[in-house]
Image: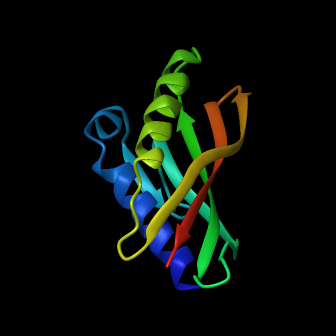
Amino acid sequence: MGDEMAVRAAVLEALRGDAALAAMLNDVWDGAPVKASAPYVVLGECIGVDWGTKDRAGREVRVAMTVQDKREGADGLAALLALVDGAVRRVTVPGCEMGAVGLVRSRVLRARDEGWRAVVEYRVRVLG
């Protein structure tokens, strides 16, 4: 279970540490905020599965996040998603050898009163 928490912390640090992303967001939340004002990113659930080899322990961790943008057009959300993607793909997990990092799936929707929302899930593979 430690790898899931290490990957989660690394993704959170990467998102919060990206200057271009920070300039476009009000905040990056670790879990659902009590009250938040868009645009923001919420780091959601992490799911870990074995990704080891014969002689090395490893985990594939799937990290879900929600990206919320209140602007009328979808261009703002698209820009946020591009920055989120770049930040996540640069993730490094201390004490682990990095495997592949990639987008597993995404869902985009438009809510009349809430603007644009995307739910994205990334796969981060690490060897311990």
Which quarter of the figure has residue 23? top left
Q: In the rendered image, is residue 38 in sight?
A: no
Which residue sits at x=46%, y=74%? 6
Percent position of residue 74, x then y: 59, 18
Which residue sits at x=70%, y=25%? 112
Percent position of residue 73, x then y: 57, 14
Percent position of residue 114, x then y: 62, 33
Q: In the rendered image, is residue 60 in sight?
A: yes
Percent position of residue 104, x then y: 70, 46
Q: Quadrant of the N terminus?
A: bottom right
Relative side of 22 to 87, left or right: left
Relative side of 128 to 20, left or right: right
Q: Count the marks.
A: 0
* Viewer-side residue, 59 vs 10: 59
Residue found at the far front of this picture: 54
* Viewer-side residue, 82 vs 44: 82
Picture layout, residue 6 above or below residue 39: below
Colour convention: rainbow
Which residue sits at x=65%, y=77%? 52
Picture layout, residue 42 above or below residue 71: below
Relative side of 17 to 37, left or right: left
